[in-house]
Image (cartoon, rainbow, N blue to C red):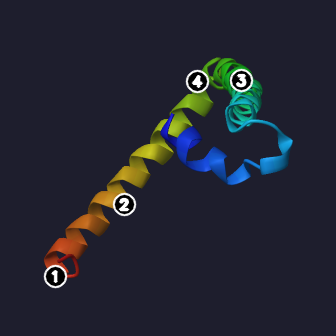
Amino acid sequence: MLFSLSFFPLFIREGRGSAGWQMLQLGVCNLLFALVIFCAVGSCSALLDRVLYERPRVTRAIDLALGALFILLGAELLWLLCAGGWR
């Protein structure tokens, strides 16, 4: 709602009908584009979920990679705290 109220008025033009009608058109277009994008993302993530979690080796590799990433982020945070780089 805040996005619509702050962003859409930038595209309202005087000679193209009432401001309310133009806002409604922009809102409907935004809704339809969001629906298409969210449906595509949902479908792709469902497919990826099936592909990845049917293979235990892939799941284990992802778990190890994420664990290593969190350990590295924790080490960097510790280094920043000890070195006084974080103020």
State whether residue 59 is above or below residue 19.
above
- Residue displayed at 67% across by 54% down: 10
Identify the residue position indicated by label 4 in the image.
Answer: 56
- Residue 84 is situated, as x and y percent measured from the top left of the image, at 16, 82
Q: Nearer the viewer, mark 4 or mark 3?
A: 3
Indicate the position of residue 12 as horizontal and vertical percent values. 73, 47
Quick check: 84 left or right of 46?
left
Please rate how many residues cluster around mark 1, counting C-alpha atoms within 10 Å: few if below 14, some from 14 to 19, many from 20.
few
Report the residue marked by disc 3: 35
What whole-number distance in Å separates the C-alpha atoms at marks 4 and 1? Answer: 42 Å
What distance separates the C-alpha of mark 1 from that of mark 3?
47 Å
Give the labeled residue for mark 2.
72
- Among the 4 quarters of the image, the one containing residue 20: top right
Residue sitting farthest toward the right: 16
* Quadrant of image for the C terminus: bottom left
**Real-space Cα separation, disc 4 to disc 3, in angstroms:** 33 Å
Q: Quadrant of residue 23?
A: top right
- The residue indicated by pointer 1 is 84
Q: CA distance from mark 2 to mark 1?
A: 18 Å
Between discs 4 and 1, the one toward the N terminus: 4
Amino acid beneath label 1: Gly
Residue in the foreground of this view, choosing between 19 and 75: 19
Q: Is residue 87 left or right of residue 35?
A: left
Mark 2: which secondary structure? Answer: helix
| Mark-to-mark CA distance, 2 and 4 | 24 Å
Residue in front for this viewpoint, 34 or 41:
34
Q: Residues within 10 Å of mark 4 (few under 14, many from 20)?
A: few
